[in-house]
Amino acid sequence: MGTAQPEGLYVAAITPFKEDGSIDDAATRAMIEKNLSEGAAGFFVAGSSGECFLLTESERIHLFEVFAEYLGSCTMFAHVGSCGTEESVRYAKAARELGFQRFAATPPIYYGYPAKAVAAYYDDIAEAAGQGVFLYNIPSNTHYDIDLHNTEIRAMFASGSIAGVKHTNLDIYQMERLRSINPSLKCFGGFENEMCAFLAMGCDGFIGSTFNFMLPHYLRIFNAYLAGDGETARELQVKANNILEALMSAGLFPAIKHILNEEGMAVGGLRKPFLPLSEDAAAVVDRVVAENLVR
């Protein structure tokens, strides 16, 4: 299953903001360069970590423009998902013109569309992108779960409109079953807390939000596993999971930005209705990170 050698780790990039709430281009470039120096294979741009649905259309396209400056150094995923097909198509066309190598999209949310409508949404995005799209499978946020028994959904995964899956789902069995429909699909793990398990099931790499600040730690897990040192990989995975548990308890994205700001990256806050961490929550996060992060 999967590639003999997974591609590597992609950062699900945050969006830095200035005090006035606008996107901070300088901080964005500093984050990109930091992660590239640490060994990132590339970036997942304007996804959940980037507060995609809290950005205006012009802001999302501007974010693509800033990341496109680094296309010669790595592989970039443009997340183009939205509530409506026309908006997603505009994002896909913009990212295609900028030269993005890959495109991803959440399923259309809120209205509970039938399988035929979901498939048509991905067909239209794929046509605009000029290639298959990665389905961003994050049912905890979209409340859309893939029905592997639905004939139209199975046909969608075999059609060519879907190039792969960003599998932000703890159901690793589902990832394997998707490949049984179409062995050419690329599957990237999206839950860092199961990196060892995803690798064992043949994933093609990882896309993670916590890579924004702990990429070197996860690269140690990744490389230890690939080198056959399962014991070290599992020990580091436990430490990573201790951190992730604290982040999730405090609020994942506010916690990530808190850590980056504490480390001097000056990425600003989050768009409302997100709230900053309380002092107590921040203290717990700081303690757990200090006790477990391997730099």
Image (cartoon, helix red, strand yellow):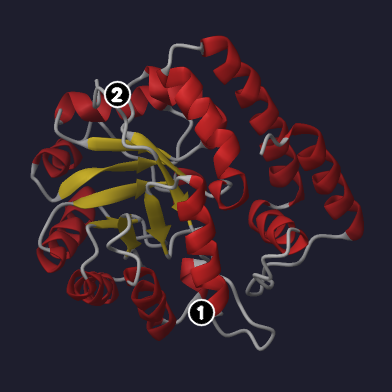
- Residue drawn at (37%, 62%), measured in percent from left and top? 111
What percent of the width, then of the height, locates residue 61? 35, 78
What percent of the width, then of the height, locates residue 28? 52, 71
What percent of the width, then of the height, locates residue 172? 40, 25
Q: Between disc 2 and disc 1, whose residue precedes?
A: 1
- Residue drawn at (54%, 29%), measured in percent from left and top? 220
Q: Quadrant of the C terminus?
A: top right
Gap between marks 2 and 1 measured at Cα: 39 Å
Residue of label 2: 176
Secondary structure type for disc 1: helix
- Is residue 30 left or right of 87 when viewed as pictured? right
Secondary structure type for disc 2: helix
Q: Which numbered tag is attached to residue 105?
A: none
Residue of label 1: 25
Q: Is residue 188 above or below residue 94?
A: above
Q: Is residue 132 above or below residue 277?
A: above
- Residue drawn at (66%, 31%), measured in percent from left and top? 241
Q: Residue furthest front?
A: 37
Camera-nearest residue between 204 and 42: 42
Camera-nearest residue between 288 and 85: 288
Residue 49 seen in render:
no
Crowding near pointer 2: few (<14 within 10 Å), some, many (20+)?
Answer: some
